[in-house]
Amino acid sequence: MKKLRTFFKGTYLGLMLCFLYAPILVLIVYSFNSSRTMGHWTGFSLSWYAALFHDSMVMEALTVTLTIAVLSAAVATVIGTAAAIGIHSMRRGPRVAVENISQLPIVNPDLVTGISLMMLFAFMNIKGGYVRMLIAHITFNIPYVIFSVMPKLKQSSNALYEAALDLGCTPLTALWRVVLPDIMPGIVSGFILAFTLSLDDFVVSYFTTQGVQNLSIYIYSIARKGINPKINALSTLMFVAVLTLLMVVNLKSIKEEHKAAAQAKKAEARS
Amino acid sequence: MGDKHLIELFDVSKDYEGDAALRHINLYVKDGEFLTLLGPSGCGKTTMLRIIAGFVLPSSGKVLLDGADMARIPPYKRRVNTVFQKYALFPHLNVFDNVAFGLKIKKLPKAEIDSRVRAMLELVNLKGYEKRGVEQLSGGQQQRVAIARALVNEPEVLLLDEPLGALDLQLRKDMQVELKRMQQRLGITFIYVTHDQEEALTMSDTIVVMKEGVIQQIGTPQDVYNEPRNAFVADFIGESNILPGVMEQEYMVSFAGGNFKCVDKGFGERDVEVVVRPEDVDIIPAGRVGENGMTGVVKSVLFMGVHYEIRVDTGDHLWQVHTTDLVDIGERVGLEILPDAIHIMRKPA
Amino acid sequence: MKRTVFAYPYVVWMLIFIFAPMLLIVYYAFTADGAVTLENLRGALDPMYLEVLLRSVWMALRATVACLLLGYPVAYLLSRMKKSAASILSVLFVVPMWMNFLLRTYAWQVLLNANGILNGVLAALGLPQQSFLYTEGAVMLGMVYNFLPFMVLPIHTVLSKMDRSHIEAASDLGANPVQAFFRVTLPLSMPGVISGITMVFIPSITTFAISRLLGGGKFVMYGDLIENQFLLMQDWGSGSALSFILLVLVLISMAVMRRAEGEAGQEGGMLW
């Protein structure tokens, strides 16, 4: 009976995984197809990958995407972390107001964020697709950083800060040497979150850009015209990159967990 | 309290990936008694409790409840209820619904559930709290809800896993009295797990002292305190002076540089361990030291309220003495020990 | 120096780039040529537009329910597995989420294509060719596919952090595994469920990329409408009015979910 239950559980999860991966696998397989169709196999070819690398628009879009992601995440992390520290010390009234407004980019559909920023840029006469996208990305990233850091701030007891002051630090030094390291996990996860959101963004970029394409916009414009195996090649490369990255990160954390557990056992045995 | 063996454990062992949590446990629990599993962290007491509850399956051995083998019976089918260490109250239900949970599962009529829950809440002094959310209650109140929730199902056995650990001292002492009173009034068998020996001594009919998965001694509180079977038990329960000694002959043991009359015999070996309780050591003027005595210098005096905790260095041993007599640090005093206060035990293998 | 000073740069940024744009929407929604008017709003409430709104909401609702029904078991099964297996499986489930959202949508374009592999399989089996693409089903499929991980994640987080002793207590009190699930696990997982619904329902209403790519423009969704007004028609007044209605809808949904979360009896979590 137990074996049957395990079988069902396994099958369900297996089916779900198939559902998730089938489209991607089809993409990958047909990226190596020599012909353009996605119906039948005509032969192995790397021509689409070559075409991809020779497509200057793709390379440009990729650069735009990556640089904006890094820059916007970095800036957002700095401003956001400072903001979190400041908000944490605010009185209840202002704090609630700021927190509520900060929720807007998170809660709003990105469609609304996109068009409202578009109107603002026109209103303020800010030109230049790259700059506009950058500002937009920073804007929607900061709240996520704030809400990643805040819980850590709340957890971090005020006692640490006071202990530092007691031992002779100026408030600024105390902040830098004691509070910041303590909330670092929140800062790091905020940065990663901001980076990811920026990489993947489509709608906000779509509305705020003026001609400059990021990867998502590029894919959208090509996909609208129909199927193009260059995109398949792009997908394959992306998939491999993401898979490797996640595997490495996870394997590292699994290894560290094992090490920590083994050390704990050793310590226990000795006591 | 009847003589029926309500719960029996035969040669129960439990291994976790090479670590033996329990080794060859043989134990029976009498119907209607308050039995305590006592020991330090990691001794296996909680594991044993969870085996009886059904959350853990023994690696070997048998568990019988009322004569029936519990091997294939899951927790939700056993007539046993548990009070968890951190209470495990359902946060999404109020006090009433928490307590009524087990009764609702049994699909009892609404009116009966209502009356039984209310009666139980009154028993634990929480009348009027029915609609409260459990997160708003204090530790002691949550404790009582957890007890009510378990008892309302009228189990044959109530298992309590260090339930008083999170409470402050005064509350803990009050709850100890209340729990004992409840148990005697309801006549339900209680199996209680704790590492606090004072608690065990206060509440139990029977104490099972455990260490590293092995039962060290089973007995009444008086037995375990006055006649500890080995040095571990002697040391764990109450405080003791433990020293190596030699049985010179029947009724005579030598330790700490002197020969003392004692009331034990027939040990066979010569090397033994000697245990003397601090309250059994008398401080007398140095000049009046007799046969069962020695002299030493007072090293420290701590006022404990009920008594003074005094350390006396006789050169061979630093003696712990509990007495109401006050002496000065540095004073030379005599220590006297009556023969029946000297406990001899075998050296551990 | 007070620590609140650290927030000042952000507050300035926030007022300019978060608060002001919202004001602009309200401004353009309720003015035309500088004068206050309700014309835009009236135009936005045109039955034709409302029909699109309703259709979008209805579609979003169905997609959300589908994600919930498919995703909850996944989250549950993952949370019950042993750490090592669960880690690897979690990674596998998360990888697609990290792929670009448009690529994921494009993937279904490929799969459902008239000359695509699905039809190829049907042909091999001797079954008639179907046109999968450019149907409502395709758009729905695209939505579920894209948003499923966002339903699984919060539920899984809540389930894996859940105190096992609650389930043990339920079992101890006589509940068999099924009863324990419905009476204890499910209610306690509600905050995660509500989180998941929030992350799926609202984006589903406003997406236009999925309907464009998989629906071929045949299904005009509310997002398409707004995009049209802004980019094609350059009619900011009308577009803002439509957005305003959308915002009201979003606010109502959030209020409903906050209420539901409050009733679930647990404190609200942060993002996760």
Image: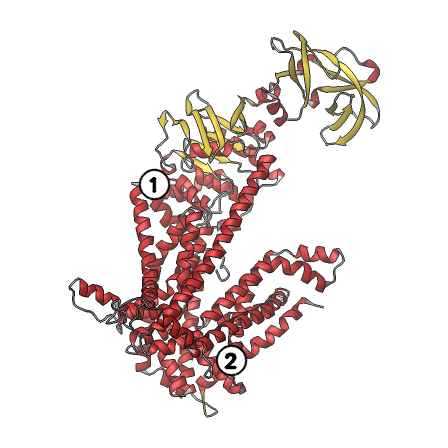
Query: Residue B247, image x and y in percent?
Result: 66, 11
Q: How many labels were placed on the picture?
A: 2
User: Residue A219 location in percent, x, y?
Assistant: 39, 75
Residue bearing the label numbered 2:
A130
Name the residue type under label 2.
Tyr
- Element assignment for label 1: loop
Q: Are marks 1 and 2 in contact (CB under 8 Å)?
A: no
Q: Residue B181: x, y in percent?
A: 52, 31
Residue A156 versus residue B141 in the image, above or below: below
Q: Pinpoint the chain carrying mark 2.
A: A
As helix, strand or loop, the secondary structure at mark 2 comes to: helix
Residue B61, label in figure = none
Q: Quadrant of residue B150?
A: top left
Looking at the rendered structure, the kind of residue marked 1 is: Lys
Where is residue C213 shown, x and y percent of the image?
33, 75
> Within 10 Å of the Cα at label 2, are there few (<14), some (14-19), or many (20+) other Cα atoms?
many
Chain to which mark 1 belongs: B
Q: Residue at x 84, y 26 (%)?
A: B330
Q: Quadrant of the C terminus of chain A?
A: top right
* Residue occupied by mark 1: B106
Residue at x 73% of width, y 58% of height: A165
Q: Is residue B129 above or below residue A191?
A: above
Mark 1 crowd level (few <14, some 14–19, many ≥20, 10 Å Cα):
few
Q: Nearer the viewer, residue C195 or B93?
A: C195
Residue C154 placement, left or right of A23? right
Labels 1, 2: front one: 2
- Whether labels 1 and 2 share one chain: no
Q: Is residue B228 above or below residue B99?
A: above
Taking the spot 45% from the left edge, 35% from the top edge, the residue there is: B50
